[in-house]
Amino acid sequence: MRARTTTTAGLGLAAVLTGVLPAQALAERPPPPAPAGRAASTGPSAPSEAGPAGAAALPKYRDQHLTWGPCPASQKELNAAGARCADVTVPLDHADPGGRTLTVAVSRIKATAPKAERRGVLLSNPGGPGGTGLAYTLALRPALKDVAGRYDLIGFDPRFLGESSPITCDPARTPAPPATTSPRADFDAAVRAARQDARRCHARGDNAALLPHASSRDVARDMDVIRAALGQRTLSYYGVSYGADLGATYAQLFPGRVDRFVVDSVTDPAATQYEQFQRSGAPAERALDEWAAWTARHHTTYRLGRTADRVRAHVEEVLAHAERRPLPVAGRRLTAPLLRMILKQPLTQAENDATVASLVRDLVAADRGELTEPGPELAAMLKMLNSPEAADSMLGGMFFMCGDGGWPAGGWPMATETYWHNSVRSRATEPVFGPFVNGITAPCPFFAEPPREPAVTVDNDVPVLMLQARRDHTRFADALAMHRALRGSRLVATDIRGHGVYGREVDGLTPVPCADRAVNDYLGGGELPDRDRECPAPRVG
C-alpha cells in the first residue's frame, strides 16, 4: 500500500498553495451542491482554481472523450484483472491551457455493485513523490473488500512518471567510492552527485522546459481534469504518505469537488520537505532503540548483544569505521551515508525488526572482514538499490522535490554548507540518522530555475478522514498540525511503529482492524466519525 521509494522512505509529503492569482490555474466547473451535512469551504481559506485564463480552453480538457483499451503490456497484472487504460490530456502549464499538452495514464477497474449502490470513482495514490500509481488499484482492492465493487477504481501515473509523458535523464556516471574517506569527503561526494543529477536531467531533450511544471499542485490540477474527463461532479480518494498530502492539496484547491477523502500518514503543512526530513531523525533514533531492545531479546539468534545499548553500539561502530573505510561487501564498497539509508528504510515498520537484525549482523561481519557473502536480506537490499525501479523512483522524487516551492515536497536550502553544518550539529543527539536526514538528499540547489509557485497553506473545513500511526517517522505532532489545518477532518490514530495505517495486511504487515473498518464504513457511504478515534494497537512480533 505504501510506495517503496529509497529517497523518501518513511516520509509522507503534502501540497496546497496560497496566494495564487485566479489567472494562474485551470478553471473548474462551478462546484455542485455539497452533500447533506457537508458544507464545502469557500473564501480565502480555500482558494478557487477558477479564472478567466483557462475558461476558453477548459472544455477540451474537461469534456474530452477517453478511449479505453488494454493497459500497457508491462502492466500484466492490471490486464489480467480486467482493467482498462486510457490517456487523459492535460495542459503542461495550467496557467496556459491553450498551449502544450501532456498525457496522464489512468487505469479503471469498473464497479460491480448494482447501480443504486455505486458511489462514482475512487482515485488513489501510493505515495512518493516519484511513485507511480497506475496499478495501485490492485493493492487497494483487497483492503476495500465489499466496498471495492461500489466504485470505479482509478489508478494513475502522475505527470512525468511511468506512462504519463515520462521525463528521462542522461545516464549517471557514478564513480566507485574510494578505499578511504571521511565524513566531509562523503558530503562533498554527495554535493557532486547532486550537481550531476541536476545537469543530466536538464541536458536531455527539452527537459529544461518541462521540469518547472513538475509540481504537486500541477498533479492535483491533473486529478481534477481526470475527474471531469470521467464525467464525475465529485471525486473520492485514498492516498498514503505523499499521496495523503496530495489529497490534502486537492481538497484545498477544489473543495467543492471532494466527496469521500481518506488521507493516511500526513505531514505538517507548515513545514518544508527538508524540515520534514530533519524531523524524521529523532523518531528514527527511537525506532533504532526499539529495534535494539528487540534484538537483545533475540541474542541467541543474532549474536549482537544481550542489552539494547550493546546492540546499538554495534551499529554506531560500523558507521564510525565506514566513515574512514567504506565496508567491502560483494565486490562493492558501502559508504556510511549509504548504510544510514539502508538501515532507516526498514526501521519504518516494526515488522521489519528481524530484517534489520540480519542486515546489521552481516554489516558487523563485513566490518570485521568475516563476511563471505551477504545474506538474503542484505543481498536483496543491494539488488533493489541497483535496480532501474529504484533509480526511476529517486529521479521522480527529485522532479517534485525541486519543482515544489515548499510544502509538500519542496523548500530546500540553496546553500550547500547549510546541509553540512546541520549534519554536523545533528550528530550530538542523532548519531546514526542525523547526518543522513540533514544532508543533501535532493539536487534542488543546482536546478536551473527556482520553483514557479509558492508553498501551499492548508486551511479549510472540508470533511476528510485522517489516519496516523503514533510512532511513525513522520511525527505524530506534525499529523496533529495537519488535523488542525483540515478543520473538518476526523483523526483515527493507533500506537504502532509504522508508516501507513490502512490495509497493512496487503503488504504482509500486522493489520489494524479498527482503522480498516473506519475507512471502509466511510467510503462505503457512512458518515465521518463524530469524534477522533484511538484504535487498539495490534501486537507486532
Image (cartoon, rainbow, N blue to C red):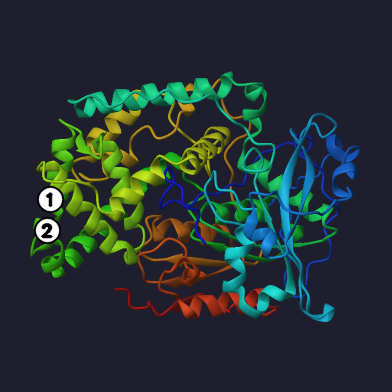
Q: Name the amino acid type tagged 2.
A: Leu
State how many labels appear: 2
Towards the viewer: 191 or 27: 191
Towards the viewer: 541 or 281: 541
Q: Earlier in the sequence, mark 1 or mark 2?
A: 2
Which residue is at a point 24% across and 23% down the rendered structure image? 185
Q: Which residue is mark 2?
A: 304
- 117 vs 102: above or below: below
Residue 49 shown left or right of residue 239 in the figure: right
Which residue is at a point 76% across and 67% down the rendered structure image? 110
* Residue 433 coordinates in the image, percent (x, y): 27, 45
Which residue is at a point 64% across and 76% down the rendered structure image? 522
Residue 126 shown left or right of residue 151 in the figure: left
- 445 vs 322: above or below: above
* Residue 336 coordinates in the image, percent (x, y): 24, 37
Q: Name the amino acid type tagged 1.
A: His
Q: Mark 1 Cα within 10 Å, few/some/many (few <14, many 20+)?
A: some
| Label 1, label 2: how far apart the Cα atoms are | 7 Å
Under tag 1, what secondary structure?
helix
- 293 vs 311: above or below: below
Under tag 2, what secondary structure?
loop
Q: Which mark is residue 142?
A: none
Towards the viewer: 260 or 302: 302
* Residue 472 coordinates in the image, percent (x, y): 38, 60
Q: Which mark is residue 314?
A: 1
Residue 31 in which image quadrant: bottom right
Residue 412 visible in the picture: yes
Q: Mark 2 Cα within 10 Å, few/some/many (few <14, many 20+)?
A: many
Which residue is at a point 12% across and 58% down the rendered structure image? 304
Q: Kindly check if marks 1 and 2 are in contact, taking CB atoms under 8 A apart as contact.
A: yes
Residue 66 shown left or right of residue 393 in the figure: right
* Residue 331 coordinates in the image, percent (x, y): 25, 35
